[in-house]
Amino acid sequence: MGSTSFTRGFAPIRTTATDRLSILVRMQLRFHVPSTRAAPTVTGPARIRPLRPQAASAPPLVLQVGTVLKVVLGIAAVLLAFHLVVVWSYLGDWRFPARDKFYLDAENNLPTVFSTLILLLATSLLAWISRIQRHARDPFARHWIGLAIVFLALTVDESASFHELLIHPLRTAYGTTGWLRFPWVVAGGAFVVVFASAYLRFLAHLPKATRWTFLAAGTLYVGGAVGMEMVGGRVFMEEGTPGRTLVPYMIAMTVEECAEIAGVTLFILGLLRYLADRSGRLQLEVR
């Protein structure tokens, strides 16, 4: 094999063909590194798949028991203050602007909207717990569903006042007066007795704190809605006339509405604590 002479400075350097080949190989390895991946085999038309956007992580929805309680009680206190001003205007024979919008005994006003919303909140919490208990195969899951249905009915009735439709027909048919001036309380009381009898085992299985909270809430709500309604009918018939509202009736009516709001608020408190004790979580997926 031939050789070639190179010069570096003044000293000749001889290289053989083998040396030149080794230099060329090293240069190729240095300046050209081929890919180690095998070329893909294309058997059909190439498809370009668009990149799917990454789902953004949404912040969790957290219901803090203390915050919910403060908001509900704060709004209730403001509405009660306006109601007392309205009562003062009635008794003092002076006109409070938009007083029908704050009078607790009126319909389709701000107190009605507030009562409807807190009943709707209780309904939503009951539906939430029902879903969790059904998933856990709890034997009392159907009782939670029943409670959710009852509170949904109370929500609709609070906003539409369907129970008021029973007053005139029953009063005309049976001539009810005094304690039964608002005769829908008979049907309401009968429903409470049947409902309570059906839920005795359910109440017994609840944790002690939840059970007593529910009982106190139910006593407040039913005592206001049915009990004070009967007291209001008695006072209205004996000391008032349909065209005039007297102090005893206004006191009874104010206690009635406040007891209903307090009962629902206490029930919501019991539901939130029941969920918190079980770390109740519900995943919302939109498809």
Image: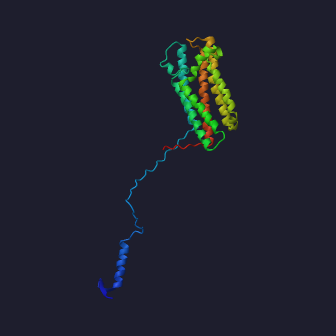
Pinpoint residue 122: horizontal percent, then vertical percent.
Answer: 58, 33
Q: Residue at x 63, y 21 (%)?
A: 185
Q: Is residue 46 above or below residue 189?
A: below
Q: Position of residue 14 (x, y in %)?
A: 32, 86
- The count of marks equals 0
Question: From what the image shows, is residue 30 above or below residue 255?
Answer: below
* Foreground pick, 229 / 177: 177
What residue is drawn where x is 58% and y is 29%? 153
Find the residue positioned furthest to the front: 44
The residue sitting at the bottom extreme is 1
Q: Is residue 255 above or below residue 126?
A: above
Task: Point out the image quarter for the N terminus.
Answer: bottom left
Asked if one can make out residue 215 in the rendered structure from this viewpoint, the answer is yes
Q: Position of residue 84 (x, y in %)?
A: 55, 20
Q: Position of residue 112 (x, y in %)?
A: 53, 25
**Side of 78 relative to 19 (left or right):** right
Identify the coloring: rainbow
The answer to whether any part of residue 75 appears in the image is: no
Q: Residue at x 36, y 74 (%)?
A: 28
